[in-house]
Amino acid sequence: MHPIEVAPARAAGLMTCLLLLASTLSAQDDPPRDFDNYPPAVAAHLTRIYADGQQAYSYRDDFPGGFDRWSKDARAELSRLLGLPKIARQNEGHRPEVKLGEVEDCGEFTRRRATIETEPNVVIPFWLLVPKGDGPFPVGIFPHGHDSSGHDTTAGVYHDEAHRRRALEEDRDVAVQAAKRGMLAIAPATRGIAVDGVPDLKDRHGGRYCRSHVVHCLLAGRTAIGERVWDMQRLLDWALARDDVDKSRVLMMGNSGGGMVTLYAAACEPRITVAVPSCSFSTVTSPTGYVYHCDCNLVPGILAWGDLYDVAGLAAPRHLLAVNGRHDGLHSPEDIERSARRAKAIFAAAGCPERFEHRWGEQGHRFYADLMWPFVQQALEKRQ
C-alpha cells in the first residue's frame, strides 16, 4: 500500500458522495424522504431478519450480570466486529511517529501542520491547535465526515472565501472553537474519506474512494470504522503523553461520518470522557431495512450484535450528547427519537441518565455550536 496523503482536490468518488449530500443540504425544507418504500415482500423479509430481539448484545434490563457485565461483554464483541484486535496484532511493535510542522500564531492559539504514522505506510495528516498559556489543557479530537476540505475546514484553514463563509455559517470550524475555549485541539484527516486509503482503480467501486477503502478493509477482516477508531486512539496516545494536557478531560466531536467515528470511538475507548456525534446518531436501518449511513460505516454483523443506541450506551457512565438537524433529510426523525429513548434507558441502567442528551438543531446537516458547547463545558467542569 502506498503512503496515504491528503487529496488536494477530491477524486470522482468523493465528489459522488458530496453531490448526494449537497442535494440533501440544498433541499432542507423539502418533505422527508420515504424511508420504507421497499416492495412488500422485500420489506417483510428485511423486517424479519432485522427484528428486535435477535441482537445478542442489545441492552435489556434482564441482561445477565446487569449493566456492568453487558458493558464489558458488548464492548469486547463490538471491538472484535470492528476488527480492532486484528489491527492491533498486525501492528504489534509499530511505534507511531509524529512529525510537527512550523508554528503559526493565530492570536488566541497557535496552529501547525502535523502527521502521524498510525500503521506502517499509513500517514494521517492533522492540524494541532494549542491555546496560549501553560495548561494543562483539556484535549479535543475532531474527526470529519465527507468534506472535500476535510480537516482544513475543522481547523479553520480556508481555501477561498466561499469555503470560509460556509464553514463559519455552519459552525464547522470546531477545532478553532475548541482552542478558543482553552482546549488543545486535534483536527485529523479521516482515513478513506479525506485521505485516499485505497484508490478506486478503474472505478471498480463506483468511483467512490470511501467504498473502495471499505471493500479492501472487509476483505482483510477489518472495517473502515475500525481503522478510523484505531487512528483516533493513536492520536490520543500521543496527545495524552504531552505535559500540557489534562488526561481526565478528553472530548471527541464529529459531524456526519466524523460523528460515526465519534460514536464508535466513545464506545471502545474509555479515555474519551465526553463525546458529541453530530448529524449521525440514529439507527443502522429503518424498521424495513433502509440503510441510513454511507457504505464506509458498514460493520458486518452489527445488527446481530445490537444497534447504534447500544453503541452510544457503551459510552456510559461518561457523557454523550447526540445532535441532529430537523431538516437533515438523511435520517428518519422517528428512528432518531426511538434510538435516543433506547440510549437514554441504557444510561439510566448505568445510574447516570443525565449524562446522555439528544438535541435537535433547527437546520440541516451541520454542527450546532450553541447546542454542543454548553453540554461539553458543563461535562468537562465536572471532571475537574
Image (cartoon, helix red, strand yellow):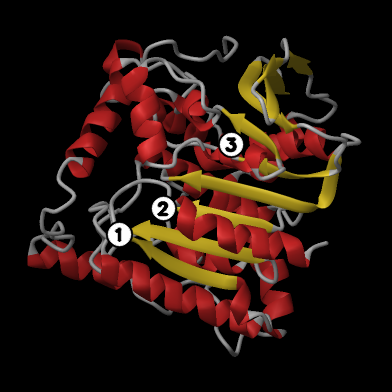
Determine the residue located farthest toward the front in the rendered image.
107
As drawn, the label of residue 280 is: 2
In front of the other: 161 or 296: 161
Q: State the image quarter where residue 108 is shown.
A: top right
Residue drawn at point x = 37 percent, y = 41 percent = 170
Q: At x 41% / y 71%, what residue is drawn? A: 339
Please state if 93 lies on the left or on the right of 124 as rendered: right
Residue 87, placed above or below residue 75 = above
55 left or right of 313 in image: left
Give the number of the disc on residue 362: 1
Q: Earlier in the sequence, mark 3 or mark 2?
A: 3
Q: Which residue is mark 3?
A: 175
Disc 2 marks which amino acid?
A: Ser
* Nearer mark to the viewer, of 2 and 1: 1
Question: Which quarter of the rendering shows the N terminus?
Answer: top right
* Identity, as a three-letter code, of the amino acid under mark 1: Glu
Q: Is residue 301 visible?
A: no
Q: Residues within 10 Å of mark 1 (few under 14, many from 20)?
A: few
Q: Residue at x 35, y 48 (%)?
A: 293
Q: CA distance from mark 3 to mark 1?
A: 22 Å
- Tell me which amino acid carries mark 3: Ala
Q: Is residue 173 above or below residue 287?
A: above
Q: Residue at x 68, y 70 (%)?
A: 71
Residue 341 position, x and y percent, is: 44, 78
Which quadrant holds residue 72?
bottom right
Q: Nearer the viewer, residue 66 or 183?
A: 183
Locate residue 121, reporting x and y percent: 66, 14
Task: Specify which label sits upstream in the sequence, 2 or 1.
Answer: 2
